[in-house]
Amino acid sequence: GAVVSQHPSRVICKSGTSVKIECRSLDFQATTMFWYRQFPKQSLMLMATSNEGSKATYEQGVEKDKFLINHASLTLSTLTVTSAHPEDSSFYICSARSPEKLFFGSGTQLSVL
Amino acid sequence: GENVEQHPSTLSVQEGDSAVIKCTYSDSASNYFPWYKQELGKGPQLIIDIRSNVGEKKDQRIAVTLNKTAKHFSLHITETQPEDSAVYFCADYRGYSSASKIIFGSGTRLSIRP
């Protein structure tokens, strides 16, 4: 299947700092990528839909100023968690469509101290 | 509404036996149903999928069946092995436009007993 690369796999940061997570489609172009958040033993919660060349579409309850999404090219989307706080600690996963199948990155475990 | 119900939430089977996970969807416009396997600390991996114009699809020990009338689809794993232990998610995907969203079930934690 198609490969989606996500980095970093794990990040620990101090409260108040910003963290950037990258999601790359390695062998296909993805006009649409998705960002999910997953709490322990729970399902994936869609945060936002990232469209290449346009603004991201955020799900209800997700702060767009808190979770900045940039999809500047057909193979790269980034999620920046701004001014991170302990409650932002979670497992973040990206996915990309190719063309209608959805493939996932390996996830990023964010821990905010 | 947007809802995919998945059962059971946990499942324990003896190695070598079969495991079945069921999902029910609500939107008749749904046309694509993938299944994902997620191991601890990793992202979900697509293991099999089925489209709404097909009733059954098989890939070695894994099969998926779809009943459009009843709006449910099931994952079947035969001859289970220890490496099948993971969390499995069904999903419901509507359309192919950029606005299309994929809705996930709540997940099934499958444990294979040696």
Image (cartoon, grey):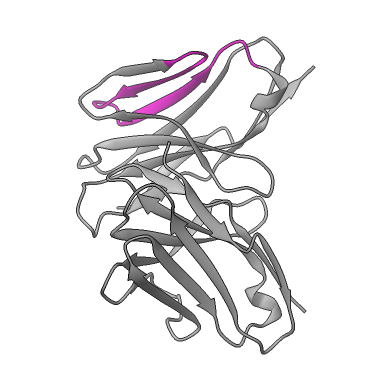
* Residue toward you, B87 or B71: B87
Is B39 above or below relative to A11?
above
Residue A106 % position (x, y): 58, 51
Is A52 above or below relative to B85?
below
Identify the image quadrant of residue B4: top left
Number of numbered tags placed on the structure image: 0
Residue B38 % position (x, y): 59, 41
Tell me, yes or no, whether the highlighted magenta stretch contains residue B72.
Answer: yes
* Residue toward you, A78 or B16: A78
Identify the image quadrant of residue A32: bottom left
Q: Residue furthest front?
A: A27
Tell me, yes or no, whether the highlighted magenta stretch contains residue B41.
Answer: no
Drawn side of residue A37 relative to residue B2, left or right: right
Is B105 above or below relative to A11?
above
Determine the residue positioned at 63% across, 47% down: B42
Name the quarter where the C terminus of chain B is drawn. top right
Residue A12 % position (x, y): 74, 73
Drawn side of residue A82 relative to residue A2, left or right: right
Residue B55 % position (x, y): 28, 19
Determine the residue positioned at 59% across, 13% down: B18
Question: What span is in magenta?
Answer: B59-80
Determine the residue positioned at 29% across, 77% down: A55
Determine the residue positioned at 24% across, 29% down: B52
